[in-house]
Image (cartoon, rainbow, N blue to C red):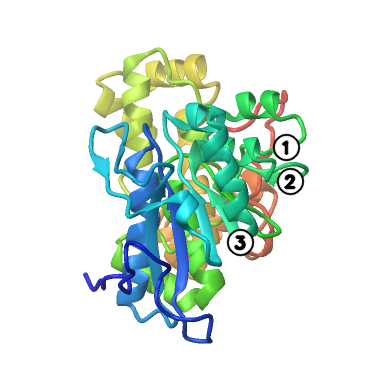
Amino acid sequence: MRTTSSPAAPPDGPPRGGRGRNAPRRVLLVAYEGAQILDIACPAGAFDVANGEGADPPYRVEVATLGGRSAPTSSGLRIGARRRLADVTWPLDTLIVTGGVGAEAAARNEALVAQVERLARRSARVASVCTGAQVLAAAGLLDHRRVTTHWRYGARLARRYPAVAVDLSPLHVRDGNVFTSAGVVSALDLSLALIEDDHGPALARAVARELVTWVHRPADQAQISAYLATPPPRDRAVADLFRHIAGHLTDDLSPGALAARAGVSRRHLARLFTAHLGTTPARAVRAVRAEAAVHLLRTSALPLAAIARRCGFGSAETLRQALLDHYGATGDTIRRMRDSPTPRPRAGGQTPVP
């Protein structure tokens, strides 16, 4: 993996370099006790890889805390900080407030919130990862903006800050110069979006390839996929089969093959799926494959035939019909949509499984 160190910065003064065309892009990560280490590592790592891939101007990433001391993260590892927040008096390109189990305490810390509010005025853009949105909200930076956060804490954020428009559907949201992202690893999706905003899609794709991740998930993709959002079937055999289906889309997933895997008859398998998932085995398989195809349509430039093969449909025409049945749209239409499509209800008002 090609990486490069951020341009050196003296610990007791501002980073070297002016604000010229090739001056480094200054990124400041705000950490505190109980921060989630991935909320720090994902952005820092992505910007580091961007430098290694030739980002011009490069990124200069620093971590700062209220007291200028290392921050114990929730994992037990400590993150070093070279600066106090109060010592940062120069313009920033990006201010990122991290999340974690300590976010609520951080949002109640008036000194920390005041520093974040001050630094936001000096930054071209402001971002939060996960529950870091609570700190931005406490600073008044999210008022009358559409934002997202970790799905588990969205209702709490909305109750405490009624002026904030919380949307838990997307992975990350941009409202003006304010970026917010969902839980933990979505920090990587946010970072790739910021890199694309700065340097274009080619560099963002190069960073994603180097990090061996999706290139890259669209902002509107749901935080939790449909088959993860579905309550786990109470029957263990059905739950095991559902996980098998999601992870083996190109395998033989016919009712006969699934029944053999579960050690039951096809008739009994059909009864189990109807009782626990509200659909037949064949329809469940088709729905999971269709959802996977939608993901590839919106995150890749693969032709429809290639997506059909990867998702177990066999032919582009079979995939096309499945998309029309489940989403009421063709592959080309889904690619042009601003937001991911919602599955069409079946007769009786039920949404297809997943």
Residue tagged by mark 2?
Answer: 145
Please rate how many residues cluster around mark 1, counting C-alpha atoms within 10 Å: few if below 14, some from 14 to 19, many from 20.
many
Q: Residue at x 55, y 27 (%)?
A: 108
Front residue of this view, candidates 165 and 201: 165
Residue 306 visible at all: yes
Where does residue 312 sit, x and y in percent of width and height? Answer: 40, 52
Which amino acid type corresponds to the residue marked 2 in the rendered image?
A: Arg
Give the number of callouts: 3
Q: State the separation of the CA atoms marked 1 and 2.
A: 6 Å
On the rendered structure, is 117 left or right of 31?
right
Q: State the separation of the CA atoms marked 2 and 3.
A: 19 Å
Up-down relation of residue 74 to residue 55 (above or below): above
On the rendered structure, is 234 left or right of 293?
left
Of the numbered discs 1 and 3, the one sitting upstream in the chain is 3
Q: Residue at x 36, y 81 (%)?
A: 54
Front residue of this view, candidates 56 and 314: 56
Please rate how many residues cluster around mark 3, counting C-alpha atoms within 10 Å: few if below 14, some from 14 to 19, many from 20.
some
Where does residue 229 sit, x and y in percent of width and height? Answer: 51, 29
Foreground mark, 1 or 3, reads 3
Q: State the separation of the CA atoms marked 1 and 3.
A: 22 Å
Please rate how many residues cluster around mark 2, counting C-alpha atoms within 10 Å: few if below 14, some from 14 to 19, many from 20.
some
Up-down relation of residue 260 to residue 251 (above or below): above
Residue tagged by mark 3?
Answer: 122
Residue tagged by mark 1?
Answer: 164
Asked if the residue at tag 2 contacts the one at tag 1, i.e. Cβ–Cβ closer than 8 Å, the answer is: yes
Up-down relation of residue 264 to residue 2 (above or below): above
Up-down relation of residue 254 to residue 20 (above or below): above
Report which quarter residue 326 is drawn in.
Answer: top right
Which amino acid type corresponds to the residue marked 1 in the rendered image?
A: Val
Residue 256 visible at all: no
Q: Residue at x 57, y 33 (%)?
A: 110
